[in-house]
Image: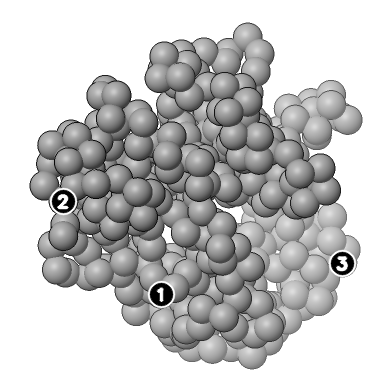
């Protein structure tokens, strides 16, 4: 692991967010070297206490951040926040617009008070008829047609991760980087608003455009019209499943040879790509029977050598044993406040052949950095106590 690629080193990001979309925005900036100070209420971000499927939210998307607790219901807490914003380059928030305005933290007000500040607002919707609606990842998947495309007809289904929230945070960080670049030109701060709905809309754009061009709607993905001769999940001899694809003429030939299906290669009904696609109804059972006679390990070895697209069907927990995930930088180990640790993926890109991560990916305890950060702002011990809601702070 290397922390040499830190293009945002020296930038201070103040983050007031919860759940996933906002925190992921701050995490991405932190991985690129920014100092990210997470402002939490005295009792801590409620996301810390989630259980079940929410257990991984906080430790995954708050890696490497400092934690400062402020009581924003008190004058001292609000004053300390403004002292902090005086030193900040970026402010990230995902509050409802009216809540932010009541606190005197609306983007327009902040821009006027801090002319060079980049304000990144992570919202459910961009400005428009829906801008004041409450949104969740699942809500926008239902609204945009993502859930319709994922499940079979009559059974809309959300996709199996918080992909919209994460990608929304990524667009938030992308907007921040663009605004920082523009600030070098105009020496002005900027307000960036990222919409979860609009993010999801972009993810279904290909289906929208197909309808706009052809005048017909794409069916849900489980019932889609295939553009490839083989693009399916099969059972191997042990019952273990494998996905196999043959998306080119060359791959069709190679797959038939590997599975000893030479008869398909000389069948006059299968001599071009469209004919192979149209014959799926009767050729797929032939492929399925051939795959069912083979061992899983034998198949993946031969497919990898021959360049056939394939994939074992894994559960997320199995990724901890995947040899590619275990390469350098594939998993980053974070220390948790309770003294244990967890592993999570790093950034999905390399720079100059090396993985990218912030100087630290540990998870700070609630308010762990309150005293140090506020002292640096010039507050004394009593002022720190009042600003943090009376909670004890580290010496």
Above or below, comparing residue 182 to residue 142 in the picture: below
From the viewer's side, name the closer residue of 69 and 295. Answer: 69
Report x, y in % for residue 308. Answer: 66, 77
Residue 189: mark:
none
Taking the view exactly as shown, the residue that stands out farthest to the top is: 129
Could you tell me how far apart the alpha carbons at marks 3 and 2 are, in whole angstroms?
75 Å
Answer with mark 3 or mark 1, whichever residue precedes in sequence.
3
- Indicate which disc residue 393 carries: 2
User: Looking at the picture, how far across and down is residue 382, in whole percent?
Assistant: 17, 41
Q: Is residue 371 above or below residue 297?
A: above
Between residues 382 and 337, which one lies in front from this camera angle?
Answer: 382
Q: Residue at x 19, y 34 (%)?
A: 386
Residue denoted by label 1: 331
Depth check, mark 3 against mark 1: the one in front is 1
Q: Which x, y percent locates residue 167?
A: 56, 46
Q: Does residue 145 show up?
A: no
Q: Give the image quarter of residue 274.
A: bottom right
Q: Secondary structure at mark 3?
A: loop
Residue 271 got which mark?
3
Taking the image as shown, residue 23 lies to the left or right of residue 341, namely right
In terms of sequence position, does the residue under pointer 2 or pointer 1 come before the other? 1
What residue appears at the point 56 percent right and 66 percent down from the top-left corner? Answer: 9
Is residue 109 in view from this perspective? Answer: yes
């Amino acid at each position: 692991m290397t922390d040499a690629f830190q293009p945002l080193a020296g930038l201070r990001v103040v983050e007031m967010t919860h759940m996933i979309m906002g925190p992921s925005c701050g995490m991405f900036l932190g991985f690129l070297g920014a100092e990210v100070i997470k402002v939490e209420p005295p009792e801590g971000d409620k996301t810390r206490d989630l259980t079940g499927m929410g257990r991984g939210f906080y430790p995954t998307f708050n890696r490497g951040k400092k934690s400062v607790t402020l009581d924003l219901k008190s004058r001292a807490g609000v004053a300390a926040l403004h002292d902090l914003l005086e030193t900040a380059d970026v402010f990230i928030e995902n509050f409802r617009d009216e809540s932010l305005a009541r606190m005197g933290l609306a983007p327009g007000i902040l821009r006027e008070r801090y002319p060079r500040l980049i304000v990144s607002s992570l919202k459910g919707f961009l400005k428009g008829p829906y801008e004041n609606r409450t949104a969740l990842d699942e809500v926008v998947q239902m609204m945009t047609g993502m859930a319709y495309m994922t499940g079979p007809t009559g059974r809309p289904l959300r996709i199996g991760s918080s992909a919209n929230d994460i990608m929304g945070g990524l667009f938030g960080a992308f907007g921040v980087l663009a605004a920082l670049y523009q600030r070098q030109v105009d020496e002005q701060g900027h307000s960036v608003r990222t919409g979860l709905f609009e993010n999801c809309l972009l993810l279904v754009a290909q289906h929208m455009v197909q309808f706009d061009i052809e005048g017909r709607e794409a069916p849900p993905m489980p019932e889609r019209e295939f553009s490839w001769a083989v693009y399916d999940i099969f059972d191997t001899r042990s019952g273990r499943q494998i996905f196999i694809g043959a998306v080119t003429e060359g791959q069709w030939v190679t797959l038939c040879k590997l599975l000893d299906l030479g008869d398909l290669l000389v069948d006059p009904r299968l001599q071009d790509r469209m004919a192979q696609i149209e014959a799926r109804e009767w050729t797929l059972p032939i492929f399925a029977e051939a795959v069912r006679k083979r061992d899983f390990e034998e198949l993946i070895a031969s497919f990898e050598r021959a360049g056939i697209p394939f994939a074992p069907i894994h559960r997320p927990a199995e990724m901890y044993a995947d040899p590619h995930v275990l390469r350098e930088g594939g998993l980053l180990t974070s220390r948790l406040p309770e003294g244990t640790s967890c592993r999570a993926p790093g950034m999905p890109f390399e720079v100059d052949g090396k993985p990218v991560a912030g100087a630290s990916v540990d998870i700070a305890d609630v308010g762990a950095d309150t005293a140090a950060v506020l002292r640096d702002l010039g507050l004394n011990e009593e002022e720190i106590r009042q600003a943090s809601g009376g909670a004890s702070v580290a010496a």
